[in-house]
Image: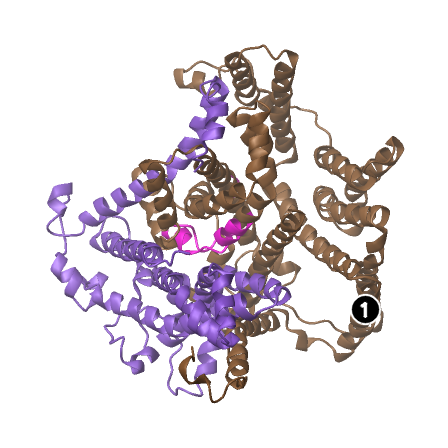
Chain colours: A brown, B purple
Amino acid sequence: MATNNEIEGFGRVSRTIGTVFRYLLLAATLVGLVFVTILLVYVAKDAVQPLTADPAWHLTFFLTLVVPTLAAGAYAYRESVEALRTGVFSVGFVVVALMFSGGAAMIFVDIVEPLTWLAFLLALAVPTAVTAAVVSYDHRVPFAAQFLATVAAFYLSLFGIPGPLGSLAGVPTLVPSLFDFVAGLPLAPAPWLMMAGTLGPPVAYVGSQYVAGDRDRRAHVLTGAAVLALVLAGGALGPFAGVDPVPGVVVAAIGLAPPLVYTAGTAANRPTERTGLVVPATIVVGSLVGAAATDALGFAGPQSWVDWAFLTGSHSSTAAEAGFYPAIGGSILLMLTVAVLAFPVGIGAAVYLEEYAPDNRFTRIIDVNISNLAGVPSVVYGLLGLGLFVTYLNQPPGTVLLGGATLGLLILPIVIISAREAVRAVPEDMRAASYGMGATKWQTVKNVVLPRSFSGILTGTILALGRAIGETAPLIMIGAPNVKYSLPAGLSEAASAMPLQVYAWSSLYASDGFYEQAVPAGVVVLVAILLAMNSIAIVLRNKYQSTE
Amino acid sequence: MSGDSLADDLTRRTQNAPPELLSRTFFFVCAALSIATTIGLILLLTTEAAKFFTFSAPLVGVEGETATVVEFLTGTEWQPTGGEFGVLALVTATLMVMIGSSLIALPLGVGTAIYLSEYASPRVRSLLKPGLEILAGIPTVVYGFFAIIYITPMLRPFIPGLGTFNMLSACIVVGIMIIPMVASISEDAMSAVPESLRQAGYGMGATKFEVSTDIVVPSALSGIFSSFILALSRAIGETMAVTIAAGSTAQFLNPLNPATYTERALPMTAAMIKLIGGDVTGGGLAYRSVFAIGITLFVITLAMNVISDYVAQRYQEEY
């Protein structure tokens, strides 16, 4: 700080250094971002090959899609910024929902039979209903009895009598479980009807709540019926559009219904943002018109490597025929396993540390330990998985369960840290109010803390999953196969994963063909899925930050 | 941690009711699992690495080939199939990744942090922060691929004779990867500098530049240093990018000589991937050497995390 010699130049300050400094800082901030953006554009160009398309194809789409979309955006912006935001959000919503419905369709086509799914849902739903009935029947039923009834109901429903406990002692099955009973039914409805029956009602219920809100009963029934009809139509009309009924139902329920519900809700409930819906409408109509026009006029599109054959094919030793399907499916299964294993534990630990932990030495040790675990390199977690599960517990290497457990341990510290932040953000007044009403600690956690911090926890956990989906080193260490030609049939089978496949292509099959075709295509799919996950997390965070 | 005596008083009467006990036990077990993970990790690494060294192998009942600690820590040749286990060849490569990436990440990261905390308007911040998060979220395999496919060819006009695999492009991508880490932790430290210090600076007639460089940065120095150490520990543990970009030939190079960065080398993490991902089967000395490298890596990164915590707390300015 200039202090002593300021007399002679008093009041005159050179702004040059400050301005230069400011722009240097801005440049430093942008270097990494711009550099990676350029690399992503390069890789997208290599994967999609836009220059192989007919110039007339580009021109057609420019006229039917780009110009109208920009015009629609400008129109929405002139109405209000919120309208434009709603428009852009609904476009993103459609893209993300369609991506996730594709993943879900993959699971129901290749991994889980619809009948098994139905049996599993019923086997969970019935004991849940029994529990609810026991709890609401009489509040004076002792807790131990409630707990036993719940455990017994779930055990009977999932395992039957005597179940795994009995089979250890060699007793044959006396009463089959509800799960086995339903899964073994000789007569079952068509698979797509079962899917529609399980996916349709929940989506219809949420949709009618969202759209009809506090309107009368008739509006609720109408919207619910419309959503249900859409889901059924996915299965019934799918075959005419070349889609099998089961994926048709799944895509209609998860990919199409939520964006349509959002659109309808915006149109019905938020008149100021209604204009924003011009944007998605223009994009949908524009792409259809563009596709029809290029088709009719015979303009060739780009020779993209990210095409249907790539997304649904499996690995091949020639780059042009290599596909990504087993890797995508493997990653989806791994992520589901990670979510089931890591999230309850991570959230539980966060709640313990924030709500229960006494301020003593042991708590401080856990605290330091978690932050140190977050800094352990992922390859060392791979060693843990290899040594603990494969060598000592004799698990077969590279299975979904093993990979999920290893990645789950890897992201556990991240989940705990972000969940703690969300739990800490719940205002102390709300807890005090709950205690003041006579609530116990568990009731406060269950009714106040967890619901209030839910979206924060969700954001952190989605970001943690994003970390897990890109991890490769631990999977290599536990012996996941580099090449897999089909989806794993269950959790105890070996699975590939997207980053692993990309690594295999760029190291084991290193050749110009793979470098220019298969790897860029794989990278584009992986990064697109990651960006979708990150954008969900960011939207969620913006939403809960603005409501608080 | 709720040292909240009011809540404790209000819930004392019910704290031993069965639902309370059950839920509290569940939450406690979840938290204790992290301790179990650490203990499991340390036990596993030490017992497996013990099988590798001559002095400790008899203690864990392993016979057959072993390597001496001296040979492991001072040897400069790494040829697991030829029985050469000099970890220095790997450590120097890791050191190169650390030095090279920090030359990129530390200045850019601190610059980003100052910009975000002092200069950027809330609107610009709300755009840049998610951008940086995405930078940190891109899988490291993808960065490794970028290094060999785009960055090495880009560098070739300037450095003739640059091979496909080289340390330079590996260092560049690792550097870019750790910018967000330096930036976010440093920015947290800078945002924690009280507004009154800045106001005092302006009151003395300081410009924004002077306030940033002479008040905010020195006050946040402990946080900035701890971000450096954490980022370096991340660079050391970085695996896939260096495995793909740096090649798979172990060489003993001088990390302080810039010319060696055009060579290929094998950092510790890449060596582990190469051994396990290759055709080394369980049980051999080469297989056990993975755990020896693993424990070396674990100890180094753990030490750096502890130092970073210590720096952040010991030298933190109290306001």
Residue found at x 75% / y 79% = A55
Query: Magenta part of the protein: which range?
Result: A462-490
**Residue B31 picture location, percent across and down:** 41, 36
Q: Is residue A481 magenta?
A: yes
Looking at the picture, does residue A485 appear above or below residue B256?
A: above
**Residue A97 picture location, percent across and down:** 69, 50
Looking at the picture, does residue B155 appear above or below residue A186?
A: below
Quickly name the residue at label 1. A74
Q: Dot 1: few (<14), some (14–19), or many (≥20) neighbours within 10 Å?
A: some
* Residue A335 visible from this viewpoint: yes
Quarter holding the N terminus of chain A? bottom left
Residue found at x 40% / y 50% = A374
Residue A66: quadrant of the picture: bottom right
* Residue A510 visible from this viewpoint: no
Residue A436: quadrant of the picture: top right
Residue B257: quadrant of the picture: bottom left
Q: Amino acid at mark 1?
A: Ala
Q: Left or right: B49 with respect to A142?
A: left
Looking at the picture, does residue B162 appear above or below residue B94?
A: below
Residue at the front extreme, as displayed: A7
Question: For this rendering, which residue is in front, B272 or A190?
Answer: B272
Looking at the picture, does residue B48 appear above or below residue B80?
A: above
Secondary structure at badge 1 equals helix
Q: Left or right: B27 with respect to A322?
A: left
Q: Is residue B19 magenta?
A: no
Question: For this rendering, which residue is in front, A210 or B71?
Answer: A210
**Residue A375 picture location, percent across and down:** 37, 53
Chain letter behind tag 1 = A
Q: Left or right: A205 with respect to A144?
A: right
